[in-house]
Image (cartoon, rainbow, N blue to C red):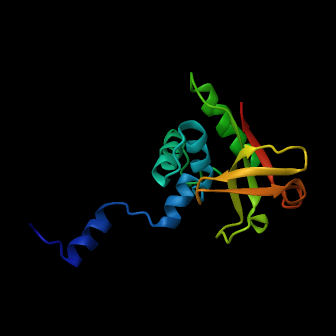
Amino acid sequence: MKTLRKIDLQSMQEELQVLNKGEEKKILGGEDCWWRCIAYIQTGQISEEAGREFAIEYCLPQDDSTGYIMSGNKTDLENYISSYITNKDNYNTGSILVVDTNVLPYEYDGEYHALVVNDWGDGSGNVEFYDPKHNEYITLSALDINASNGFYVNIK
């Protein structure tokens, strides 16, 4: 078995385009929480790889020289859902909340985070969400969601 020397790795990096995590996130649309939510709703899978498949499916047809694919704003996310639905014969429905991370009951490195609506609640104003990235259920009040400028994106 041949061993690669450091100089060989450096020459490979010069010839091949190597992306660091930040560049990959920029191309695939930021944090993978959005893509994991899509993967969970459509396939039941929560892995980074499952989310990445949806990101790549969305991003590859784009012709964007800046590498900027999806901003994470409500309009971009709704446009993604609309294009996803029109290109599929069969898809699952669901709702995703994009919310300011300040209302989350755990530390999260980022400004916004996507969660899947699991249960709209019993009218008390509390909504239960599933977080595919952290594989846990959390409950947020409507008051917290509104105060954090959270918004829903529906797949219907």
Please indicate, yes or no, whether residue 71 appears anywhere in the rendered image: no
Where is residue 69 drawn, in percent x and y? 59, 50
Q: How many marks?
A: 0
Q: Residue furthest left?
A: 1
Does residue 22 sit above or below 150 in this rendering? below
Q: Which residue lies furthest to the top in this view?
A: 89
Quarter the N terminus occupies: bottom left
Q: Residue furthest bottom?
A: 6
Quarter the C terminus occupies: top right
- Identify the residue at image location x=58%, y=56%: 135
Where is residue 90 drawn, in percent x and y? 57, 24
Please indicate, yes or no, whether residue 9 appears anywhere in the rendered image: yes
Q: Seen in the image, is 83 located left or right of residue 154?
A: left
Q: Quadrant of residue 106?
A: bottom right
Q: Quadrant of residue 10?
A: bottom left
Q: Seen in the image, is 91 located left or right of residue 116?
A: left
- Identify the residue at image location x=79%, y=65%: 103
Where is residue 11 drawn, in percent x and y? 25, 70
- Identify the residue at image location x=69%, y=58%: 113
Which of these two is toward me, 26 or 139? 139
Q: Seen in the image, is 29 located left or right of residue 118?
A: left
- Identify the residue at image location x=56%, y=21%: 89
Does residue 152 sit above or below 10 in this rendering? above
Where is residue 22 drawn, in percent x and y? 52, 66
